[in-house]
Amino acid sequence: PPVLVELALYVNGEARQLTIDTRMSLLDVLRDRLGLTGAKAGCDRGQCGCCTVLVDGRRVYSCLRLAVTCDAVGVVTVEGLSTAELHPLQRAFMAHDALQCGFCTPGQLCSAAGMLDEAAHGWPSAVTDGPTGAPELTDAEIRERMSGNLCRCGAYQNIVAAIRDTLR
Ligand code: FES
Ligand code: FES
């Protein structure tokens, strides 16, 4: 029989309390229990990155993360990236046409937000500081750091351009 547990987590800054089946993934909790359908179930097996969200600031594949391990953690989904205004990455994605069908986009945005934060903190590899003191990533570095997010429409060129623009 299913084992039910209480889960308390902070999603996009809001405290949420719910009872879940221990077998549920974080993605299923977000989409099916909290109505946050931005993160997508592209493959549901850790291969595409469409389900990427930030957990305590680090990007994770929410399809592979058991929700029960998220007690008391902070989760940010694409819905939480922007508040009154669009996130700079969202604006850059629009300006650079960095999407076609948009299915991968929520994951790309969350991943890019997490990646820029990682880069700003010099993780996981050395990052050279640009003239403004902001991290300066080559296109190859951006591609490598975003390689966990697939786009079946092949919008990679423009995704890289949008991220590069956000770094300026
Ligand atoms: Fe999670 Fe594809 S849905 S990696
Ligand atoms: Fe269609 Fe990326 S825009 S999968």
Image (tube, grey):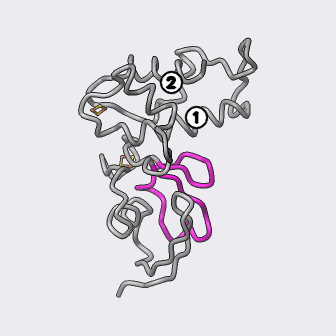
Write down the region rendered in magenta: 53-77
The image quadrant that residue 28 belongs to is bottom left
Q: Give 13 or 144, whichever is nearer the viewer.
A: 13
What SS does tag 1 mark? helix
Label 1 amino acid?
Met
Residue 95 vs 46, above or below: the answer is above
What SS does tag 2 mark? helix
Query: Residue drawn 51% across and 72% down?
Result: 16
Disc 1 target residue: 115
- Crowd rating for badge 2 (residues with CA inside 10 Å; few <14, some 14–19, many 20+): many
Label 2 amino acid?
Ile
Left or right, residue 93 beside residue 152? right
- Crowd rating for badge 1 (residues with CA inside 10 Å; few <14, some 14–19, many 20+): many
x and y percentages locating residue 118 in the rendered image: 65, 36
Mark seen at residue 165: none
Left or right, residue 125 beside residue 101? right
The image quadrant that residue 19 belongs to is bottom left
Tell which tag, 2 or 1, sits nearer the viewer. Answer: 2
- Of mark 2 and mark 1, the one earlier in the sequence is 1
x and y percentages locating residue 7 in the rendered image: 52, 76
**Residue 75 colored in magenta in the image:** yes
Residue 128 vs 35, above or below: the answer is above
x and y percentages locating residue 40 in the rendered image: 33, 49
Residue 61 vs 69, above or below: the answer is above
Disc 2 target residue: 163
C-beta proximity under 8 Å, tags 2 and 1: yes
Most extreme residue toward the front is: 84
Q: Give 88 or 130, whichever is nearer the viewer.
A: 88
**Residue 157 colored in magenta in the image:** no
